[in-house]
Image (spheres, helix red, strand yellow):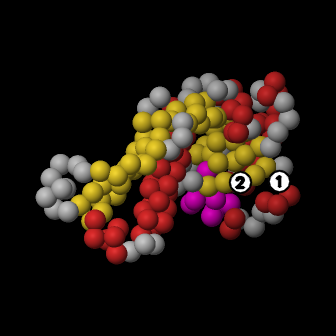
Amino acid sequence: MPTIGHTIPLTRQALAHNPTLQADVDAYLSGGLLVKLEQAIADALAASTGTVAHAYDTDLATTIRTGVAAAQSAMRELGPGVITVALSPDDHAALDLSGVRLAQWPAVIISSPALPTGTAYIGRLKLAAQLFANPVQVVMGYASDQFIRNQITARATVDALAHVAAPGAIVKATLTN
């Protein structure tokens, strides 16, 4: 599995004089890893072959809603489950502003900046796209000439692999005409 990491340089004085800094460092490292894991999943979705293509239909809301219907029929072997619509924040905002009552849809809608504008991935994504990961490891140590500069590096790493197990269960919808 590939290793995904995130680092932050610190000074020893800052760590010694600011007891709350450790919590901030943990939050920064965790957030950085989550962003990179989210990008890994988005990249795996974009690179997967065998997804069900769904063309633009009338408008954004109609395209996504008919995509949800297509996803409900795709790969029924996965069994019943929640349909998820994953799209970019810009597309999500446009959908919200379209006036459609999304609460009545048989799908959960999520947005991620890792996804490109103009494309939505629809399906039982919890079953069809997976992330295999080992526990996160956090270490602090010197890199390069940091000892001379009284600095250390905090590094969080995780061995993780984003995998699209059932691309035929995912509808890839084009949201623009």
- Residue in the picture at 64% in, 48% down: 86
Can you give x and y, in whole percent of width and height, for residue 170 in the image? 68, 34
- Residue in the picture at 69% in, 65% down: 96
- Residue in the picture at 69% in, 39% down: 125
Residue sitting farthest toward the bottom: 17
Q: Secondary structure at mark 1?
A: loop
Position of 15 relative to 33 (above/below): below
Residue sitting farthest toward the front: 16
**Which residue has dot 2 on it?**
109
CA separation in Å, label 2 and label 1 = 9 Å
Q: Nearer the viewer, residue 86 or 31?
A: 31
Q: Which residues are magenta?
A: 87-95
The image quarter containing residue 130 is: top right
Main SS of the magenta segment? helix
Give the number of the disc on residue 105.
1
Q: Secondary structure at mark 2?
A: strand
